[in-house]
Amino acid sequence: MGSSGASVEAVFFGTTTVYLSDGASGILIDGFLSRPSLLRVAPDLGRITRALSRAGVTLLDALFVSHSHYDHAMDAPEVVKHLGGRLFGSASTLNMGRGAGLAEESMTCIADGDEHRIGAFTVRVLAGVHSPDNRFPGTIEEPLVPPVRASSYRDGGCLSFLITHPGGSLLIHPSANFVPGKFDGLDVDVLYLAIGALGVQPQRFQSDYWRHVVEATRPDLIVPIHWDNFFVSLDRRLRPLPAIFDRFAVTKAFLDRKSEETRIPVRFPEPFEVIRPFAR
């Protein structure tokens, strides 16, 4: 493949795990494929390799972790061990890598404003805040060796990723909160927009979220992420989080209304579906 927009492919794996490739380079954002119950929180190598194989993912240069909660980061070190490449993340994420036995030279600590070239891609790191009611704040202070409690996966700070390529640009925003003004003027082609727990927030918060994330970046397409029930295996159809965690119907109605008002299409991806985000 060349580096035209049509050559860039994206695959969604549920929650916030998204794979991007132009045929020459491969990038994974987050790494959560095992999707275990809360009774035993540990990577499942069988599920990890099956998911990657089903998606045809054999090329990995870089894996960027948005924050170190288990539903974003738990499998990331195992994916790097399986496919190669480099793990990029916070100090907490690197302690997950150490716990999994990754070598220091295969990990890079990242912070707000960093830019990394991965082939024809450039990944810019943008610090943010976790969605309201963060259950497991804090940092992972020492190498984390699973199985452990879900609460051991402290967030370690939240990041979004602006990914540019000769074919186009996209923002992957993995947590449904905002820093006012942070994304002003970014102007992306595609916005991967976290909507987890957005349905239980006040209407004012929802409107502010739209203004500071969507209106600021002016995407041509919105792809919602982090809406699915991540306790359900990827072998089964994606379904929304249970009502105890979120009110998906409220969020869906909000997105439908905003999409109609702004004429920005909203596309819910299927797991393993290959889309070409920059193809016109």
Image: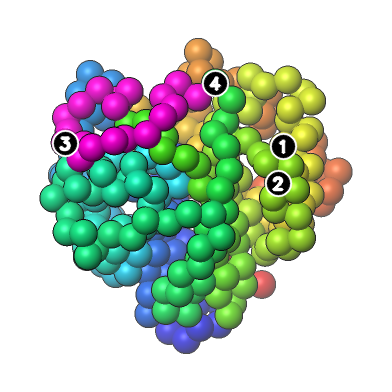
The amino acid at mark 4 is Asp
Foreground mark, 2 or 3, reads: 3
Look at the numbered discs 2 and 1 and tell me whether their residues touch, using CB distance below 8 Å: yes
* Along the line of sight, the residue nearer the viewer: 216 or 59: 216
Q: Residue at x 37, y 69 (%)?
A: 26
Residue at image mark 3: 145
Q: Main secondary structure of the magenta part?
A: loop
Q: Which residue is mark 2?
A: 213
- Residue located beneath label 1 in the image: 209
Q: Tell me what residue is drawn at x 72 percent, y 37 percent.
A: 209
Asked if residue 275 shows in the view, the reply is no
First in sequence, mark 4 or 3: give its number. 4
Which quadrant of the view contains residue 81? bottom left
Residue span colored magenta: 134-152
Tag 3, which secondary structure? loop
Q: CA distance from mark 4 to mark 2?
A: 19 Å
Q: Residues within 10 Å of mark 2 (few under 14, many from 20)?
A: many
Residue 158 picture location, percent across and down: 50, 42
Q: Residue furthest top?
A: 244
Q: Earlier in the sequence, mark 2 or mark 3?
A: 3
* Helix, strand or loop at mark 2: helix
Looking at the image, tell me whether mark 1 or mark 3 is earlier in sequence order.
3
Q: Of the residues tagged 4 and 1, which is closer to the observer?
A: 4
